[in-house]
Image: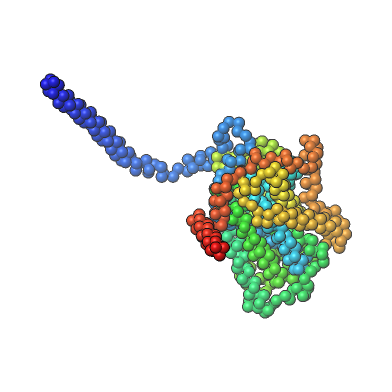
Amino acid sequence: MGDMLTTTPHKETTLQENQEDDSFKENAEETVKHISIEEASNETLNEKPEAHTQKCEYNPITHFKNFLNGFKRQKQNEEGADLEMQDTQLSKTIKARHLLMISLGTGIATGLLVGNGQVLSKAGPGGLVIGYFISSVMIYCMIQSAGELGICYRGLVGNFTRYSSLLIDPSLGFALSILYTFQWLTVLPLQLVTAAITIEFWTDLNPDIFVAIIFIVVIVVNLFGARGYAEAEFFCNLCKILMIIGFIILSIIIISGGAGNDGYIGAKYWKNPGAFANGFKGVCTVFTYAAFSYGGIEVLVLSIDEQENPIKVVPNCCKKVAYRILFIYLLTTILVCFLVPYTSPQLLGSLNKGENSGSHASPFVIAVESHGVKVVPHFINAVILISVISVANSSVYSSGRLLLSLSEQGTFPQFLNYIDQRGRPIRCFVISLTFGLIGFVASSEKRQDVFTWLLAISGLSQLFIWLAICLSHIRFRDAMKTQKKSMDEVGYKAQTGYWGSWVAVLIGLFSLVTQFWVAIAPVDKNGKLDVMSFFQNYLAFPIVLVAYFGHKLYYGNWCPLIPLSKIDLDSHRKIYSPEEITEIELQTSGETIFEKSGKEEGLNDNVTKEHDKKSVYSN
């Protein structure tokens, strides 16, 4: 017992000493580590300025090598990855501010600013306004349908034509792919010819000089990829919108007699020479031109795979399209009709001869210049030139993505399915730019004929594309109902709904039928059949027929429509959860989650109070 009493304190002392030794060793090791880290950090700190100085040194050879390396093929995440997944390689650099300007300003160029002069001379002011209003209803319904499908089918490059292949018929999708791609390929030379016509306002130099300059600008912008396209569009569209606002204000002042040499104008030109030219047929000529003027409005959905936050931005832009239609198109068209008589010899395509005949100036410039307002026409013409460059830029961007889509689907050679390190479909760009060489006919005496041919392809093809979008939306809704899928899975629902697409389809079919009538008996040929005029007005239709039946013959699939029960709604569609739907609704409405919860609490309080009142009265 005594031994135990004497040995126990000794053992405890030994344990304490061992623990102290261990803790001392650990502290010593940590101290050594800390010292070594500090020394290492001091060494790196001393070396940093030299390294930083070396990094900041500009080396043109290195930059040039990086520039060349940017054209190399982008590496795949997995070898042998499915071609359907390769569209995710495109760079996602389009921001919300870019897309807002793209949705507001893209397409404001040749059709509205120059081509309207040609249709004004054929339809008169009344016919022009009526035709634009009818087309506007179709456009608004169409863009709502495109927004719903775009949010559902995110990640489909060249998505409009893919909708038709998935929801209607593969042959129709193929035909529309060919047509839509061909349309955007012809837009570039069309804009170059328009630029030459616009520049004639200032100089008589060879137009091909300016065509070459603009062509180089378009190439340089597109070398910067989606970001370059977006930044250029932001600047150009901002200029266009500011010009439109200024034109609206100035036009109202001129019409009311506050500016110009003619005093109060009012509705003078609606009385003399009149509101309508060529009657109902004149109104029918408007639809193709209006379609071309609105062309490009769907690009905000075409670029959805290169947007940073499409869930928020696309629905917002679709909702704001109504303002663009009302103020940028309808209001400006009405004001031009008050300021320019349809008999003006300066209008593009005018058959009337007189002073300044054949100048073919923009109706916006004529509207201001003809009433004695100086300097301002030069600013308007400059913005029109910027607008033309903007649409030329959009044409290269859009046609490149469409060619890439056709290559991914196997329709076009796999050689085009090439995306470089900077996320650019560079080989598709080369094809697009090659078509731009047609624009060098600007110095030719036949350039107005070239303008008319290119416009015929672009205008009518837009009607086919918009019809296909609306039909795809109808088929999508019908397939969802047939397969008992819930619409609560859809991220964005079109404001015009299911029947809005039907309204757009009816207007589109009416436009195609009346355009066929105008093509057979053209206005400028006194109603006599002319083969050249027919193809100039209806060239897109034979292209669709040949491509459609060629695809049917090649694949031997003669079924006109995919049965609703067999439409694949799962492979490519994004299915949204209730939480995601709520988030989208909050983002598009601009309402915070706290505001929404506060409203719900207030609603619940009101329900409780009503219930208490009823219970008191019942008692």
Is residue 450 left or right of 251 when viewed as pictured?
right
Q: Residue at x 61, y 43 (%)?
A: 574
Work out whether residue 606 or residue 595 is closer to the camera in this orientation and state it.
606
Q: Quadrant of residue 164?
A: top right
Q: Residue 345: image x %, image y %?
A: 75, 68
Residue 188 visible in the current orientation? no
Where's residue 477, x and y in %?
A: 70, 48
Q: Which of the two residues, 352 or 114, is positioned nearer the viewer here?
A: 114
Q: Residue at x 88, y 59 (%)?
A: 528
Instruction: Say which residue appears at 78% left-offset and 60% top-offset.
Output: 285
Give the color scheme: rainbow, by chain, secondary structure or one colour: rainbow
Could you say where residue 102 lies in the image, as x and y percent from the top left?
A: 60, 55
- Residue 426's spot in the image, x, y percent? 61, 42
* Outermost bottom residue: 263
Find residue 335 and report its image quarter.
bottom right
Q: How many numbered dots are placed on residues in this image? A: 0
Residue 87 lies left or right of residue 352; in this view the side is left
- Which quarter of the image is occupied by the C terminus? bottom right
Which residue is at the far right? 528
- Residue 132 visible in rendering: yes
Q: Quadrant of the N terminus?
A: top left
The answer to whether 356 is drawn above or below residue 551 in the figure is below
Query: Measuring 56% from the left and 37% from the top, which residue is drawn there?
Result: 74
Q: Is residue 253 above or below residue 364?
A: below
